[in-house]
Image: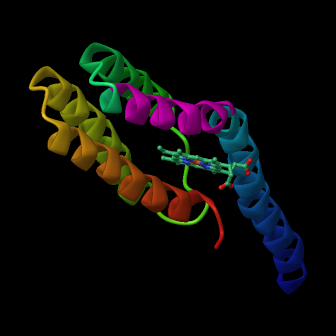
């Protein structure tokens, strides 16, 4: 009976570590193209709001909300899914608040939305990138 334990342990660890590796690979396929677009989108918001182009800035906030929405189902490799669900929602809400601030032409609230996005970006990176 004892002799059966080793192969079973090997199989279980192969499944556990194998699925973690598959999750990490799947994440990268989804995340990398998004990461290539986000820095430019954040800079565009700053440029458009500095130029008082509130319509253009609102469009960029919506682009960012869409990009984050596409990350809804990625699985954190460095934290738990519940925390990611929370951070993910906070990112989208910050982008929506940015759109509201554009509607109100409120430069301070636009800046607040941008700094919230940067804050939740750092939280997102902590959940997915080993420091
Ligand atoms: C405004 C928000 C964000 C910006 C501007 C941003 C920007 C970037 C940039 C420039 C990189 C490549 C350089 C580096 O490693 O630092 C990167 C990598 C990465 N980001 Fe983000 N990011 C944002 C939000 C997020 C969020 C919410 C997640 C959560 C899924 C995330 C996950 C990652 C991952 C996993 C990598 C590493 C990708 C790889 O290994 O190639 N990022 N991000």
The answer to whether 79 is drawn above or below residue 65 in the figure is below
Residue 72 in sight: no
Q: Is residue 85 left or right of residue 98?
A: right
Residue 17 on image: x %, y %: 76, 63
Residue 63 quadrant = top left
Q: Is residue 103 left or right of residue 25?
A: left
The answer to whether 101 is drawn above or below residue 81 in the figure is above
Q: Is residue 106 left or right of residue 93?
A: left
Residue 52 in sight: yes
Q: Is residue 38 magenta?
A: yes
Residue in the image at 81% along x and 69% along y:
8
Q: Which residues are magenta?
A: 33-48
Total numbered badges shown on the rendered structure: 0
Residue in the image at 13% along x and 34% along y:
106
Residue 71 on image: x %, y %: 51, 36
Going by the picture, which residue comes out furthest to the left? 104
Q: Is residue 62 left or right of residue 101?
A: right
Magenta-drawn stretch, dominant element (helix, strand or loop)? helix
Along the viewing direction, whichever of 105 and 14 lies nearer the viewer: 105
Residue in the image at 60% along x and 30% along y:
37
Along the viewing direction, whichever of 7 and 130 lies nearer the viewer: 130
Q: Which quadrant is home to the C terminus?
A: bottom right
């Amino acid at each position: 009976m004892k002799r059966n334990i080793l192969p079973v342990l090997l199989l279980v660890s192969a499944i556990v570590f194998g699925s973690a590796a598959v999750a990490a690979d799947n994440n990268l396929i989804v995340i990398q193209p998004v990461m290539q677009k986000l820095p430019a989108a954040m800079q565009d918001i700053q440029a458009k709001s500095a130029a008082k182009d509130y319509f253009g800035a609102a469009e960029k906030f919506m682009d960012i909300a869409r990009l984050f929405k596409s990350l809804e189902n990625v699985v954190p490799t460095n934290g738990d899914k519940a925390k990611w669900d929370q951070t993910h929602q906070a990112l989208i809400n910050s982008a929506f608040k940015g759109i509201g601030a554009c509607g109100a032409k409120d430069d301070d609230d636009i800046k607040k939305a941008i700094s919230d996005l940067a804050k939740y970006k750092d939280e997102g990176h902590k959940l997915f990138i080993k420091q």
